[in-house]
Structures are given as structure tokens and as C-alpha cells.
Image (cartoon, helix red, strand yellow):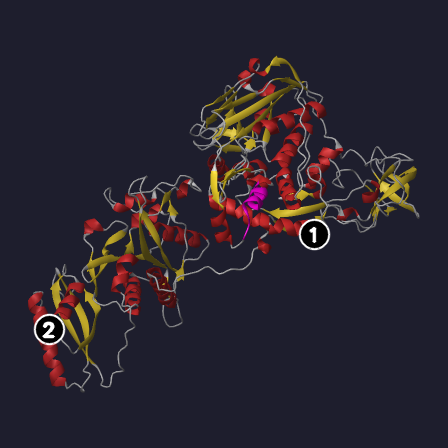
């Protein structure tokens, strides 16, 4: 936010140098990023006197002006119709850089040399008048710099505010902080309302149909208004903070918004049907044209300001073209309201509109400040627009917001902050920013935050206020007392790091997604109606509708990440995520939190080379990653079995396996179901795994295990069998393990085949078994006998035959 130092001084006396003030604000949590001299660009603009004007020989609309700049005369080509001999005007010299970025150079205009430029208000950002050159007061001295002649001296602070400090999105809000820093008092703007005539309730009315999203709506009516340009002081204030002056009425609403932090909006009262206001949500498919001239389709939950027939504004975001203040407007209905931050945030995001008003409303404005801002703006409109205030105001609300009483412990505050402040010191600090404070015994304060501090709700919030007002730099460094014993959480943290290192070693990249998901994700994953993952926990204040519930699976986030990457032509992805899922146990009960490891692989296994084509990744590749992860964690007795067809939801039937360790199911690995890919707008295959980390942890050994380097060689034997095609290869591998032959070191499946010459209804499966002894080199006869025994047992158990 831009803050003009000269504007700031209207409300608080400032004795500090700008640099010192910037440092002090930064140390209280309001980071000043840049201090700029607002009028730096006017350094080469001087006061010039037009001595003589001659016709331009080659152009009817241009004239040649001889201008006295104090130490010499200068010839300037000028097209301003209001230029006259004897006038004083701003003269820009060669090299002047204007606010729009252009640089003035010597030039020849229609054959005549021009050494400088006589400037308008608009060109110098000292107003909006573009009709001619800016005429200066005759008392200005020729040759003086314009900043000296007009006493233009102002520093502008660019302050980076955190989202919780909506109270500082105004000049008065910053002035309040400055007053607290300097231990001085504030000077609030004086409002003296003089209204007359009919009571406003006889001319208009306000109906709030959605009080949850619009708890308060205040309005005043100004008649006999005259629309015109704002006076210089008002235009200058707006320009100082980067706003463009438009006309006196619009400028006043912007001025009060920047001054007090309360967005306002003015409607052309004669354009309102039935001359009344109705606050409601938009209808399905309703269209509306905003002030920028764009027709927009409204979402059903968008809060709208309407007249008796139609919408006239998107509440808290932007007004409508159909009620815009124009040059012919004579009656203005002025709005000052409090809107739900969540409602405005959702609407602004959906509409893609980010305005000064929405920026404030979505962070939270002062619910008790609507009438103050309304009266301030109404008084200015009556003064600067020669209008008449209609008697009274409308202030629709359900009742004043209840004050929040917070009990603060002095002892706890000092302990947490590592400081030593007394009760009186803490009370004075909080009172300096307009908190209500009452002493309660010797160790407590009862604190009532002001209504504009919507971010204060708990004792720790008050402790933060005391810390920043004391100056973070003044808090001594202390170290918390932390128990030295190891905790279970540390083991979990160490395991996460191990898992990340292993998966990164396999070429995977960690994804960190939000812990929220779309409610529709359960349908997109084809989950059954009784699936626990459908037990959703609603978020009271979601960022968007796409993130309206806590996630019950990591898979939707990975698929969304895949979609975003593919849209950027990144089609080869290996992603993993470690994070918690949340299974609702009812809205009034804490959810069950389960930590998962999930991964996704899509695209190629290997790129095309001169001697080989590129290879697409498949089920066995992602299964190999899981096996490698388990091996890296020293998890034993892991087995993969086929998932029954009716249990395959977001993975494809026949391409899904469930992982079990010690008889406990830990997760699954498989090929993503085509319908799931379609619903996530994905057009290439993806293979996923999802493992329950909480269940996996007990199977990971606490001690590191090491094997001696083998002294004797290993040898391998293959076995190929013809089995029924429904027999799972994993069950045959498990059968080998059950034999418990001591000399078997390793075994794995390397081939499955169906087709001629294998009989129909059968398939060929091939395994490789590795044998090794730790005591001797195995003879072929010994190995052959053991291998034959294993083969015979498998043939009998699985009703198999040899090829």
C-alpha cells in the first residue's frame, strides 16, 4: 500500500525523519519496502513566463512561444489553446522524464525547433485537466523549480502489509500506528452533517435478503449534486497513492476509502428502478455488465446490490454500468456496507476481479465504521458538489456486534515473549492503539479490541501486539527449555526423510499440494457410496469451491498436478507426495488423520535412442518403485495380490495389486482407470501407488540391518510352468517362500505368456530362483535336487504342468 507522508501528517504530527519512521514501522510489523520522493520527476520542470506568442508558419493549430525561464529565453512550439502572453506555466526542460515514462528531447515540429515543453496538469500528474497548459499563480517566481513554487514536497512509503492487518489499509490506520510509535495522539477528520428536507425513508429503502453475507448496509441520499472535476487538493491526494481522479463524486468515494479504509459506492439514484436497494444473491445464469463495460455471467452465490428490478452492482467488488455516475447525474445514493470477507473473496476470485474495494472487504473491514465513512463522504459531496443532504440515513443491520473480552495474563505474556514488562506498561501499549483495557488483579488485563481490529481474537494475538509495539529488536534472545528425550514424532520425521531420499533416488519429484480438494473428487475417483473416503469434512471458509473439503486421498492432488504440467507440455512425470488425509467423524468431532505416501508415474520409461525406441512406463515399473522403496526401508515379507474386480475404483481391473506386509493391507498400486483420467481431463495413462504410512511404520526396523559380504558364489535356476490363467503369479511366489528353503536367496517373476502353443485358458509363468550358501560353494547336484523338489511342490499345489 502506498502512503503519502504529507497526507499522513493530516492526522498525526510527525517529528521523525522519513527514514527513521520507515524503520520504526518495519519493526512493528508494517514493512516499508521503498521510500520514494513523489516529485522527483519534476526536478527539471521550472516556472516559465510566456513573453511572446507568434503564429507557426507551417501549422494553423500550433504557435511559437518565447518563454522566459529566468536566466535565458527559450523557444517552444505549443498547441495549447489557452496559452497567452504574460502567463506563468510549467516549463519542462530537455531530459525531463514524465510519469508515463517518456523523456523530453529537443525536437523539430513542422520545421520549427522546440527546446522545451509547456505542460498541462495531466502531463505532470498534478491534476486531470488536459484542455490546455497549467496556469500558475502570478506570485510564482520565474525560473524557480516547480516543486519550490508550488511547495511540492512529499515522500511516499510503499508498505507491504500482511493479510491480517486490514486495519492498516488506510491512511488513518497507518497514522494510528505512527501515533503509537511516537506516543502522540491522533487527529481524526471532523464531520459536521447538515441535512434537510424529506426524510430519506420516504424516498428510498434498503432490504437485505442475505444478512449472513451482508450484516450491515448504510446509505445516504444527496440531491442537486453537480458533477465536475475535483479540486486540486483532492486530485493530488488520490494521485499521491496511485489512484486516477475521475470526477468529484467518484473521487470522494475513493478518497474516503483510502483515508478510512471503508470502500464506498455511489449510484445514480434516478437510474434505480423503484428507487430502492435490495441485497441478494445472484440467480443461476444471471448476466451483468460491470463498470469496465464487460458483460459477466454471475455465479449463484455472488452477492449482488440490486434495485427493484435488476442488479446494479457486484457487492464489494465493482459497480454496474447501468447506475454509473455520469455528467448528468443530480442525485446520488451513497452506499457504505459491511460484507462477509468469505463471500467477497469467493466472488472476486470467480470473476477474476481484484479491485481496491474487494482487496479491503475480503480481508475484513470495520463493521462499526460504515456510518462514520458514510457521513464523511456525504459531507464532502455536499461541499464539493454543491449538493443537499437529504434528512437522515438508512442503517440496516441485525444489531451491533458484541464486544470481545479477552483475558490476558501478564506472567504468560512475559514468559512467551521472553521479556519483563509490568501490567501498566502492557496496558499503556494496548491503549495506544485504541484497545479498551481494564486491570484484573495484579496479573491480568481484560482487553476489548476495537471493532476495526478484526484479526484479534485470542490472548496470543494480544501478546503479538505487545511484542511488536515493544519493538521486536528490543526483545532479548532467549532459548526455550526443550526436553532432551527422543520423541515418536522424531522417528516419523526421520522416516519421511528416508522415504523422500529413496523416491528422489528413483527420479521422482516431491509434490506439495493443498490439504483441500474438490467435493466432486469422490465422484471423479469412482468411490463407492460406503467408502470411508466419502466421509468429507467441510471447510467453513474455503479459498475456492474447488477446495471446499479436506482431502481424503492424495491421488486427486497428484492428478491435478499432472494435468497442470501436461497443459504446459511437460508429459513425462514422476511425482510423489507424503501428507495427511482427513476422514470426517462428524462436523463436531475432530477428523481421523491418516498419513499416506502416494506416487504417480506417467509418460516414458526411457527416451528414444539411436538403437531403440522410447518405452512407455507400465504397471510393473510403478510396482518396482514400491518394491524398491520397501527394500530401501528394510521391510520384509511384503506381498502383492490382485485386487478383486469389484474393489477397483480409481484403478483399472486386472492392472491393480494390493500390498500387504505381515498380513496387513497397506495400500495399492495400479493403472489409473480410464474414466478417472477422463474426469480429470487427462489423455495419457498414469500409474499410481498409495500406501498408508501409519500402518507401514511398525514394519520398518528401528535398527539398521547389514549382511556380511558373501564369500561364496550364487547360482540361478529358472522354472516355467503352465497354470490356469486365473492363478496369480504372486501366489506362486508366496508358495516358494512357504517352502522355507534355507538356500533360496532371491526369486522373481520374469515372464508371463498367453497364446499359442499354451493351451487356451492357461498361461505360462517363468521364475528365476537364486541359491547361495554362506558356508560352501554349492554343487550342481545339490542345487538340482533342491530346485526339482521346489518345482514338484509348486506343480502339485497349483495343478501345473511343465511345458
Looking at the picture, tell me which residue is in the foreground, 475 or 608: 475
Q: Is residue 61 magenta?
A: no
Asked if residue 798 lies left or right of residue 630, the reply is left
Q: Please identify the quadrant where the C terminus is shown.
A: bottom left
State how many labels appear.
2
Q: Quadrant of residue 219?
A: top right
Give SS at disc 2.
helix
Classify 375 as above or below 425: above
Q: Is residue 189 visible?
A: yes
Q: Residues within 10 Å of mark 1 (few under 14, many from 20)?
A: few
Asked if residue 745 lies left or right of residue 45, the reply is left
- Give the residue number, with chain letter if any, for mark 1: 19
Classify 397 as above or below 39: above
Q: Are marks 1 and 2 in contact (CB under 8 Å)?
A: no
Q: Is residue 424 magenta?
A: yes
Residue 517 position in % (x across, y down): 37, 46
Predominant SS along the magenta part = helix
Q: Is residue 801 visible?
A: no
Looking at the picture, tell me which residue is in the foreground, 347 or 432: 432
- Give the residue number, with chain letter if any, for mark 2: 791
Residue 681 position in % (x across, y down): 37, 47
Mark-to-mark CA distance, 1 and 2: 86 Å
Residue 474 position in % (x across, y down): 59, 55
Q: Quadrant of residue 270?
A: top right
Q: Please identify the quadrant where the N terminus is shown.
A: top right
Looking at the picture, tell me which residue is in the foreground, 734 or 151: 151
Give SS at disc 1.
helix
| Residue range of the region highlighted in magenta in the rendering | 420-430
Amino acid at each position: 500500500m502506498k502512503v503519502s507522508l504529507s497526507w499522513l501528517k493530516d492526522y498525526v504530527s510527525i517529528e521523525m525523519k522519513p527514514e527513521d519512521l520507515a524503520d520504526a514501522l518495519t519493526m512493528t510489523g508494517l514493512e516499508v519496502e521503498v521510500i520514494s520522493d513523489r516529485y522527483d520527476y519534476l526536478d527539471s520542470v521550472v516556472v516559465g513566463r510566456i513573453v511572446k506568442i507568434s503564429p507557426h508558419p507551417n501549422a494553423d493549430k500550433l504557435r511559437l512561444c518565447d518563454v522566459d525561464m529566468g536566466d535565458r529565453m527559450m523557444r517552444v512550439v505549443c498547441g495549447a489553446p489557452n496559452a497567452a502572453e504574460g502567463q506563468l506555466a510549467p516549463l519542462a526542460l530537455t531530459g525531463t522524464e514524465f510519469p508515463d515514462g517518456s523523456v523530453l528531447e529537443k525536437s523539430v515540429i513542422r520545421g520549427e525547433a522546440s527546446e522545451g515543453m509547456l505542460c498541462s496538469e495531466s502531463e505532470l500528474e498534478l491534476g486531470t485537466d488536459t484542455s490546455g497548459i497549467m496556469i500558475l499563480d502570478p506570485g510564482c517566481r520565474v525560473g524557480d523549480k516547480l516543486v519550490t513554487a508550488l511547495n511540492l514536497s512529499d515522500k511516499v512509503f510503499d508498505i507491504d502489509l500482511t493479510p491480517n492487518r486490514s486495519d492498516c489499509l488506510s491512511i488513518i490506520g497507518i497514522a494510528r500506528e505512527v501515533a503509537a510509535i511516537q506516543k502522540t495522539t491522533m487527529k481524526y477528520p471532523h464531520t459536521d452533517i447538515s441535512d434537510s428536507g424529506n426524510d430519506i425513508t420516504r424516498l428510498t429503502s434498503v432490504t437485505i435478503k442475505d444478512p449472513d453475507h451482508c450484516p450491515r448496509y448504510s446509505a445516504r441520499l444527496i440531491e442537486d449534486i453537480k458533477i465536475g472535476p475535483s479540486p486540486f487538493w483532492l486530485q493530488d491526494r488520490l494521485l499521491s497513492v496511485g489512484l486516477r481522479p475521475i470526477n468529484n463524486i467518484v473521487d470522494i468515494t475513493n478518497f474516503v476509502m483510502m483515508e478510512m479504509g471503508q470502500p464506498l459506492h455511489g449510484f445514480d439514484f434516478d437510474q434505480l428502478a423503484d428507487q430502492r436497494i435490495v441485497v441478494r444473491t445472484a440467480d443461476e445464469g444471471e448476466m451483468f455488465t460491470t463498470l469496465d463495460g464487460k458483460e459477466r455471467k454471475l455465479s449463484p452465490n455472488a452477492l449482488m446490490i440490486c434495485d427493484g428490478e435488476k442488479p446494479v452492482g457486484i457487492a464489494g467488488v465493482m459497480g454496474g454500468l447501468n447506475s454509473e455516475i455520469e455528467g448528468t447525474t443530480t442525485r446520488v445514493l451513497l452506499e457504505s456496507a459491511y460484507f462477509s470477507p468469505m463471500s467477497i473473496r469467493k466472488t472476486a476470485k470467480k470473476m477474476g476481479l481484484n479491485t481496491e474495494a474487494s482487496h479491503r472487504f475480503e480481508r475484513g473491514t470495520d463493521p462499526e465504521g460504515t456510518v462514520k465513512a458514510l457521513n464523511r463522504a456525504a459531507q464532502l459531496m455536499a461541499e464539493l458538489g454543491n449538493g443537499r443532504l437529504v434528512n437522515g440515513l438508512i442503517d440496516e443491520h441485525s444489531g451491533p456486534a458484541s464486544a470481545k473480552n479477552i483475558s490476558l495474563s501478564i506472567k504468560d505474556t512475559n514468559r512467551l515473549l521472553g521479556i519483563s514488562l509490568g501490567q501498566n506498561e502492557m496496558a499503556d501499549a494496548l491503549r495506544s492503539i485504541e484497545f479498551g483495557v481494564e486491570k484484573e488483579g495484579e496479573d491480568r488485563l481484560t482487553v476489548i479490541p476495537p471493532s476495526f481490529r478484526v484479526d484479534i481474537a485470542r490472548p496470543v494475538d494480544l501478546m503479538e501486539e505487545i511484542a511488536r509495539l515493544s519493538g521486536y529488536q528490543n526483545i532479548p534472545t532467549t532459548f526455550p527449555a526443550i526436553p532432551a528425550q527422543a520423541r515418536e514424532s522424531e522417528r516419523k520425521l526421520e522416516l519421511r526423510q528416508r522415504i523422500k531420499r529413496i523416491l528422489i533416488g528413483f527420479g521422482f519429484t516431491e509434490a506439495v499440494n493443498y490439504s483441500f480438494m474438490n467435493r466432486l473428487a469422490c465422484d471423479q475417483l469412482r468411490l463407492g457410496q460406503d467408502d470411508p473416503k466419502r466421509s468429507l469434512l467441510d471447510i467453513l471458509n474455503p479459498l475456492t469451491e474447488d477446495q471446499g473439503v479436506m482431502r481424503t486421498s492424495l491421488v486427486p492432488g497428484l492428478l491435478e498436478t499432472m494435468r497442470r504440467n501436461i497443459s504446459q507440455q511437460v508429459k513425462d512425470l514422476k511425482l510423489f507426495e507424503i501428507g495427511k488425509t482427513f476422514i470426517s467423524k462428524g462436523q463436531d468431532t475432530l477428523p481421523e488423520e491418516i498419513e499416506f505416501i502416494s506416487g504417480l508415474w506417467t509418460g516414458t520409461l526411457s527416451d528414444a535412442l539411436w538403437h531403440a525406441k522410447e518405452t512407455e512406463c507400465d504397471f510393473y515399473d510403478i510396482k518396482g518403485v514400491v518394491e524398491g522403496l520397501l527394500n530401501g526401508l528394510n521391510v520384509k515379507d511384503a506381498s502383492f495380490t490382485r485386487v478383486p474386480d469389484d474393489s477397483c475404483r480409481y484403478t483399472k481391473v486386472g492392472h491393480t495389486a494390493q500390498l500387504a506386509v505381515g498380513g496387513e493391507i497397506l495400500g495399492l498400486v495400479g493403472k489409473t482407470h480410464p474414466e478417472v483420467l477422463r474426469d480429470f481431463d487427462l489423455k495419457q495413462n498414469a500409474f499410481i501407488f498409495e500406501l498408508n504410512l501409519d500402518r507401514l511404520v511398525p514394519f520398518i526396523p528401528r535398527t539398521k540391518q547389514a549382511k556380511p559380504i558373501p564369500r561364496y558364489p550364487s547360482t540361478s535356476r529358472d522354472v516355467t510352468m503352465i497354470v490356469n490363467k486365473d492363478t496369480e503369479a504372486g501366489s506362486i511366489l508366496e508358495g516358494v517362500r512357504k517352502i522355507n528353503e534355507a538356500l533360496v536367496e532371491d526369486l522373481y517373476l520374469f515372464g508371463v505368456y498367453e497364446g499359442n502353443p499354451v493351451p487356451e485358458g492357461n498361461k505360462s509363468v517363468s521364475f528365476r530362483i537364486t541359491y547361495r550358501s554362506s558356508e560352501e560353494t554349492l554343487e550342481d547336484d545339490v542345487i538340482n535336487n533342491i530346485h526339482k523338489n521346489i518345482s514338484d511342490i509348486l506343480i502339485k499345489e497349483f495343478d501345473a504342468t511343465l511345458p
